[in-house]
């Protein structure tokens, strides 16, 4: 695959042309860097309380101000990146791995397998996704791992559906029939192309799913069913700052902006990926 | 006989950011008389469709642009007309049908409505009257009038193309432009559709420009033929001129590449090489890179069409010396 | 068509039974005794036993589920663990508020999203498109609860134009609806935009232009109706998200709806309320889903034909008439 025109390189070249998508990618990388280095770059710890410095509005020493316990919000937001990114990535990994396997099996093997899997999925999809996440979270209890599981499991049906549709579309293409009528070793090359074509809607869905997972985790934590304080999860920070909204809105504002930026980055990467993978060049 | 259409030096370019300027049509000129059928023949990519779109002023802009020439229809200049006026021409005085019938019809409108639409838009008639005329158009193209309320997906490819023809002829246009109307159909259906078009043409007195790459179809349908290559007309004349007195090396090559049931050729003889990239046309004669009769001068100058008889024009150095 | 609707309704009933089973056994898996959650950790063993007896918690799970299902099919959704009142009553009194909120948000989504999507597609590349598309991107990325709080801060606490909580009248509807509709409308707008761009490339648009049809009719008669089909899918999806979102938004705005009630019940381990509530929400969503599918049939005759299973008779008609 060191070929200059391998499908991955072609997609990457197309993606690179999209300035907005590259900006999103840059944002995402920045967020990952922040998440990984938060402990070193944050000026304060995420739970360094100083009651004498409560409710300070944004200033030089505290760029985002301090909260009701005197903690530096900027540091908490930075640390929160680690929490949100890890929840987002792991829960999406859960949804994607289980969902893609289920969906591909259903799409590829068809008939009975498809029927059984689809009926089960129908039951899951009758419930709004977030409702399912809330129920699972309520059953498991609060906590980081449980939050990952709830958000991850609730995302499985949507992923399975996309995977199934994608595999079904590919299986019906004429080039598969053509592949079957020729040499097996050619078939392997085509299998690579099949996978790439089948993967493209799935990959796009994964980036969108990542955006949704971060929001879902934040929402869960906001209503008290996800990640608990003092863990600096952005949604939990919003819940904590809610009662002080009138006089000290920055406690709520900055974590929310952080969520927005993360989700925004994911969304434009997803858009860029979808456009780059589209075989019909845009006019 | 009056000339219905006069195209002179029509030039159309497509300007793109990443692929450069594509010179799709270069100084194309031809005339059409009333009731005459002109065949525009050439390979895919020669520019035939673009010429047709230019006449209809349907060239997508951006990236396409008509940058020169004139098109006179009856007594009006099509290129100088306002868009509002042009809309009255399309569908009523000049109609066009396209290559792929499968996608040419709106899937969520009944076929009857789609025929009636052009009648209602172009003529001041009541809805009931338009519907009545739509039914008679359906019958004229050989489809039961009772199928007025059916949807496109309920018809086969051949029938869809007939509906497209019904739409095009509903307002009795003076000129019909047919862009490869039977290419997407199988041969038996092709014969039926062409027959039908011929009959309608004779009945209604319509002039026609038939775009095709199939010399067999041209022989069946056209009085006049123009061979298009790389955006230019390289040879033009009556059907007899082109078929019996073929002069341009490209045309000779085209006829030579036709497979023949008679004779015992073991291999096909295509014209070697490929049509040049319209964004990167060669200097001089556009066909020279592939021409078996090329001489040094061919790559230096471009040549104009020379009139070698009353009706026959050729763009070639070997035919120009008089 | 009626046949199709009936088939769908029967399938939905089975699906909902599946949902009730799923929720029941999911709640079974929760650690801890619901009696202790409701009565408190220090409840006496007698109180706990009494609780178990009242709510039939001593029987094995399958028996309890069978009993539950039997009751549901007879209209009895059980009694709340927290206050012993009938579940049906508890959730049905709060349900209309949630429905109203979801309905208003859906209407706002469609009214804002569809026209703006058309506008940005027509004016593609111009500043209107860039501005609106950027706004939409940001809108889709904003977490609802955050937007709600920011709006409360701006319009209620600072300017004082709108109330911050409650749901007593039209003026109370504005902020929650805007909060919920923001992300949805943005998503619908983006889908409408890309759908229109897809349609504008189609050959039948070129055919319409070749007929001399005016641009406005091309947009509204030819492009719009064909573009709406994928948009309806997205609207259906958004409604699902809206149902989920009401649980959070009602918490933010202290709206006494089913969403907030369910969250409280889940935390308090009031299982009958949870089961009933989830069932009701799923049931509503199934109805919405069916509505979307019927809307497809209304718009697209090909889908209408497939619902009516007419494909065979169409083929025969084609054969009879000849090609």
Image: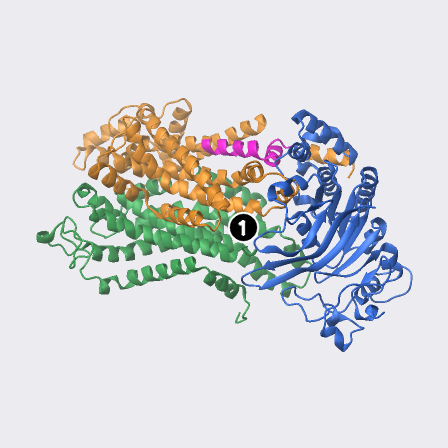
Please, is residue C88 above or below residue A161 in the view?
Answer: above
Asked where in the image residue A222 lies, by quadrant, the reply is top left
Chain identifier, green in the render:
A
Please, is residue A192 above or below residue A214 in the view?
Answer: below
Kindly report the secondary structure that dominates the magenta region of the rendered protein.
Answer: helix
Residue position marked by numbered label 1 in the rendering: A166
Residue furthest right in the image: B263
In the image shown, does C19 or A205 lie closer to the viewer? Answer: A205
Chain identifier, orange in the render:
C
Please, is residue B304 above or below residue A67 in the view?
Answer: below
Query: Could you say where residue B95 lies in the image, as x and y percent from the top left?
Result: 71, 43
Q: Chain B is drawn in which colour?
A: blue
Q: Is residue C249 left or right of residue A207?
A: left
Asked where in the image residue A157 lies, by quadrant, the reply is top left
Asked if one can make out residue A122 in the rendered structure from this viewpoint, the answer is: yes
In the image shown, does B89 or C114 lie closer to the viewer? Answer: B89
Magenta residue check for C308: yes
Asked where in the image residue A44 lies, by quadrant, the reply is bottom left
**Residue beneath the point at 37% across and 31% down:** C104
State the extent of the magenta-drawn residues as a range: C288-310
In the image shown, does C108 or C303 lie closer to the viewer? Answer: C108
Q: In this view, does A125 lie to the left or right of B244?
A: left
Query: Could you say where residue C71 lies in the image, as x and y percent from the top left?
Result: 39, 24
């Amino acid at each position: 695959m060191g070929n200059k025109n391998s499908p991955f390189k072609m997609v990457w070249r197309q993606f690179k042309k999209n300035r907005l998508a590259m900006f999103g990618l840059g944002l995402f990388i920045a967020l990952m860097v922040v998440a990984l280095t938060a402990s070193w770059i944050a000026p304060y710890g995420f739970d360094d309380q100083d009651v004498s410095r409560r409710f300070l509005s944004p200033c030089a020493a505290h760029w985002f101000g301090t909260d009701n316990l005197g903690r530096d919000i900027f540091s908490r937001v930075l640390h929160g990146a680690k929490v949100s990114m890890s929840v987002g990535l792991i829960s999406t990994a859960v949804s994607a791995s289980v969902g893609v396997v289920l969906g591909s099996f259903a799409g590829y093997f068809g008939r009975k397998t498809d029927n059984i899997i689809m009926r089960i999925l129908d039951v899951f999809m009758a419930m709004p996704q977030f409702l399912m996440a809330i129920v699972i979270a309520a059953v498991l209890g609060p906590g980081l791992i449980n939050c990952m599981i709830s958000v991850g499991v609730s995302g499985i049906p949507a992923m399975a559906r996309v995977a199934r549709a994608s595999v079904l579309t590919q299986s019906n293409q004429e080039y598969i029939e053509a592949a079957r009528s020729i040499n097996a070793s050619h078939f392997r090359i085509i299998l690579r192309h099949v996978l790439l074509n089948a993967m493209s809607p799935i990959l796009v869905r994964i980036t969108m799913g990542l955006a949704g997972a971060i929001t879902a985790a934040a929402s869960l934590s906001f209503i008290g069913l996800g990640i608990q304080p003092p863990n600096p999860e952005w949604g939990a920070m919003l819940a904590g700052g809610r009662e002080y909204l009138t006089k000290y809105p920055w406690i709520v504002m900055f974590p929310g902006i952080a969520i927005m930026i993360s989700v925004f980055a994911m969304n434009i990467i997803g858009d860029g990926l979808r456009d780059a993978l589209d075989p019909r060049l845009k006019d | 006989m009056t000339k219905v259409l006069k195209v002179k030096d029509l030039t159309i370019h497509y300007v793109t950011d990443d692929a450069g300027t594509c010179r799709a049509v270069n100084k194309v000129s031809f005339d059409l008389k009333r009731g005459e059928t002109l065949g525009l023949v050439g390979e895919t990519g020669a520019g035939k469709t673009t010429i047709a779109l230019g006449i209809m002023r349907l060239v997508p802009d951006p990236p396409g642009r008509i940058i020169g020439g004139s098109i006179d229809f009856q007594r009006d200049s099509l290129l100088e007309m306002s868009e509002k006026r042009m809309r009255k021409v399309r569908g009523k005085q000049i109609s066009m049908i396209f290559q792929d019938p499968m996608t040419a019809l709106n899937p969520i409108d009944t076929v009857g409505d789609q025929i009636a639409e052009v009648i209602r838009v172009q003529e001041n008639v009541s809805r009931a009257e338009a519907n009545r005329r739509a039914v008679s158009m359906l019958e004229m193209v050989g489809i039961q009038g009772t199928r007025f309320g059916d949807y496109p997906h309920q018809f086969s490819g051949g029938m869809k193309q007939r509906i497209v023809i019904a739409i095009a002829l509903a307002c009795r246009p003076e000129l019909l432009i047919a862009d490869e109307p039977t290419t997407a159909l199988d041969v038996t259906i092709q014969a039926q559709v062409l027959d039908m078009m011929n009959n309608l043409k004779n009945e209604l007195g319509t002039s026609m420009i038939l775009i095709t790459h199939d010399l067999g179809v041209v022989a069946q349908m056209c009085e006049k033929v123009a061979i298009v290559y790389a955006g230019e007309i390289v040879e033009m004349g009556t059907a007899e001129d082109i078929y019996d007195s073929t002069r341009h090396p490209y045309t000779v090559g085209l006829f030579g590449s036709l497979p023949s049931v008679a004779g015992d050729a073991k291999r096909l003889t295509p014209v070697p090489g490929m049509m040049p990239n319209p964004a990167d046309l060669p200097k001089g004669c556009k066909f020279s890179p592939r021409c078996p009769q090329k001489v040094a001068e061919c790559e230096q100058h471009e040549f104009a069409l020379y009139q070698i008889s009353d009706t026959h024009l050729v763009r070639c150095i070997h035919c120009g010396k008089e | 068509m009626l046949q199709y609707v009936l088939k769908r309704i029967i399938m939905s009933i089975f699906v909902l039974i599946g949902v009730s089973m799923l929720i029941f056994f999911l709640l079974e898996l929760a650690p801890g005794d619901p009696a202790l959650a409701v009565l408190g950790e220090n409840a006496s063993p007698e109180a706990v036993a009494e609780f178990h007896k009242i709510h039939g918690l001593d029987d094995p799970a399958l028996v309890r589920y069978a009993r539950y299902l039997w009751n549901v099919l007879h209209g009895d959704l059980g009694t709340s663990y927290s206050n012993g009142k009938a579940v049906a009553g508890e959730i049905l009194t709060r349900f209309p508020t949630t429905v109203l909120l979801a309905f208003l948000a859906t209407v706002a989504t469609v009214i804002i999203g569809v026209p703006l999507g058309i506008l940005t597609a027509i004016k593609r590349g111009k500043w209107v498109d860039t501005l609106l598309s950027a706004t939409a991107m940001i809108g889709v990325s904003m977490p609802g609860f955050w937007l709600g709080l920011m709006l409360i801060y701006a319009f209620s606490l600072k300017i004082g134009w709108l109330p911050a909580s409650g749901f007593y009248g039209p003026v109370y509807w504005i902020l929650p609806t805007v909060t919920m509709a923001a992300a949805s409308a943005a998503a619908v707008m983006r889908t409408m935009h890309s759908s229109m761009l897809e349609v504008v490339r189609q050959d039948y648009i070129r055919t319409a232009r070749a007929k001399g049809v005016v641009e406005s009719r091309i947009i509204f008669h030819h492009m719009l109706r064909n573009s709406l089909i994928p948009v309806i899918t997205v609207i259906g999806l958004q409604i699902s998200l809206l149902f989920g979102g009401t649980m959070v938004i009602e918490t933010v705005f202290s709206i006494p709806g089913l969403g907030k009630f369910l969250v409280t019940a889940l935390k308090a381990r009031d299982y009958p309320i949870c089961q009933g509530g989830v069932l009701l929400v799923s049931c509503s969503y199934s109805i919405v889903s069916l509505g979307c599918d019927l809307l497809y049939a209304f718009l697209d005759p090909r889908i209408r034909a497939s619902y009516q299973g007419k494909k065979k008779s169409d083929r025969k008609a084609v054969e009879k008439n000849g090609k």
